[in-house]
Image (cartoon, coloured by chain):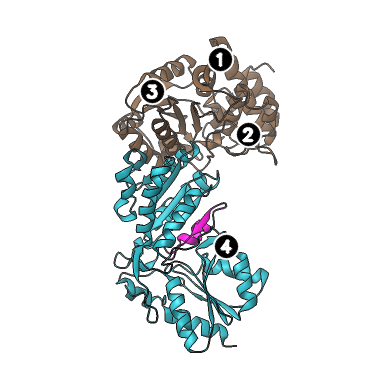
Amino acid sequence: MPVGRRVDNEELEAIARRLRKHIVEATTKAASGHPSTSLSMVEILTVLYFGGVLRYDPQNPDDPDRDRFILSKGHGAPALYAVLAEAGYFPVDDLLTLRALGSPLEGHPNMCRLPGVEASTGSLGQGYSIGIGHALAAKLDGRDYRVYVMVGDGESEQGQVWEAAMYAGNHALDNLTLIIDRNGNQQTGRVDEIQPLDPLDEKLQAFGLAGRTIDGHSLEEVQDAFDWARSMAGGAQVIVANTIKGKGVALLEAGQDKWHGKPIPADDEAAALAEIGATP
Amino acid sequence: MSFGLTRLDLPEGAATREAFGETLAELGADNDRIVVVDGDVNNSTFTNHFMARYPDRFFNVGIAESNMVGIAAGLAACGKIPVAASFSTFLLSNAFDQIRMSIAFPNQNVKLVGTHAGISIGEDGPSQMAIEDVALACSLPGFAVVVPADGPSAAAATRTMIDHVGPVFLRCGRPKVPVVYPAGPDFHLGKANTLRDGGDVTLIANGIMVAMALDAAETLADEGVAARVIDMHTVKPIDVEAIERAANETRGLVVAEEHLAYGGLGATVAMVVAERKPTRLAFVNIGDTYATSGKPDELLVQYGLTPAAVADAARRVLKD
């Protein structure tokens, strides 16, 4: 039976810094990818994999009792790869093969090529439905694993997300937690200007999901939210995590609506890594 | 329905959707990995038989095909054998990207069953008629695509589909259809069945066109033409050997299907012939158009899906 890994708060902060470093280095080396959308998810992934939330075993990635994390916003792959490497699914050095021919670290996650990847994603809107399938299978098989699915706020413009929310909210899937990485921006601009989602919390709760809104960069709030989700019996939950696109790198934070899908230029990499403060 | 048959007196049997639904319910008894995901059409697809016997393994997700396909993919990832059944056009056309991304790309062991395929659904009209579904399914790497001719074939195809590891699209129709295999077919995925031998011309068909091809072969026999009839129930992987043999041993091929001209059985056979053994070809299909409402038999005549049309195509092939 896989178990969760719990490190102390100081180590959580160090891991978060390392994830940021990996994200920047891998995408800059690949000269492509989505660092800004990856950086907004860092604290959530850190707590999931190292805050005692997700029960997993990198030596046995297909253990039927493992908890699942499904990254529906597949363009956040650099963050997923970074946390999987830190968790021990594959060597950290492999992160620098991101997007290269022959590397299983493809531009978007491919579950057939990389252990720890639970779903092949990248066409937006599909991960939550897949997560429902996993959650239903747990009920059928009498297993107590939990399923966590992360979608973006821009991704929430997809109708399938709401089809899935309707189903999850109506079917007592207490083993299913949706996380919305609400970084406020999509490819060409601000979500608020393109397709405003508010009142997002109320909409989700109207679909039958138990909801909580947090600061997605506060390790403490993220930890509390997952503790709350796991304590909720009887229904599916949603955590709306308010985040900042490009969090931790001033260049990206200063132009959140301008850096979608753009790596940090090589000339700016050293400054970005210095701000992140990760030790090698 | 007569399906335009004038020479053969084939007994009317179950609709292919009906045979699928009944067989699936039987299979559920011994295989608890089978689960069904429904888009609220279980009394049309006949998965209601499965629902009645195994309610815990039956999920009606409502009228939401995208979500339905995604849920099936998640269930498959956990070792289930999900059967996602709906009207073929709603499944393949509405949820195509989900099928591509959540099933085909990660090669998930999901069985898609599309019923009410083709124009033989009749009065409900073109919005409900899947006429491009075979092309869509064939375009997906790793998918097997099966179009059974009659009830016994659909039953056999259902069993084969469950045993096969990998994604499958099974195409079923609405109307009751003539029985082509009274004793049941010898059914193997990717292996065509030769129903009648002949050395002059070959009639390759699937679905409801198989009975029509057999009927056309009788008419051609009266004219001194010996037609071979092949039930090409599996469009993908196609039986290359059967096609190559027919191209070598007869003077040309007719390919008949209840589908658009593009991307279905005809196009697939043409690819094989072009590469292996160029020969004369003629096609019987819906062409490049949507149909209309009407009685099923009327529509089959209107859109040229008749034994007479198959025989005419054979005469064209043999003309020079």
Badge nearest the viewer, 1 or 4: 4
> For the residue marked with disc 4, what is the amino acid?
Ile
Badge nearest the viewer, 1 or 3: 1
Q: Position of residue B9 (x, y in %)?
A: 36, 77
Number of marks in picture: 4
Residue B134, which numbered label?
none
Badge nearest the viewer, 4 or 2: 4
Establish if B223 lies above or below A107: below
Shade of chain B as shown in the rendered figure: cyan
Shade of chain A as shown in the rendered figure: brown
**Dot 3 corresponds to which residue?**
A213
Q: Position of residue B230 (x, y in %)?
A: 52, 71
Dot 3 lies on which element? strand
Chain for numbered disc 4: B
Dot 4 lies on which element? loop
Span highlighted in magenta in the image: B131-149
Residue B238, which numbered label?
4
**Dot 2 corresponds to which residue?**
A263
Q: Is residue A261 visible?
A: yes
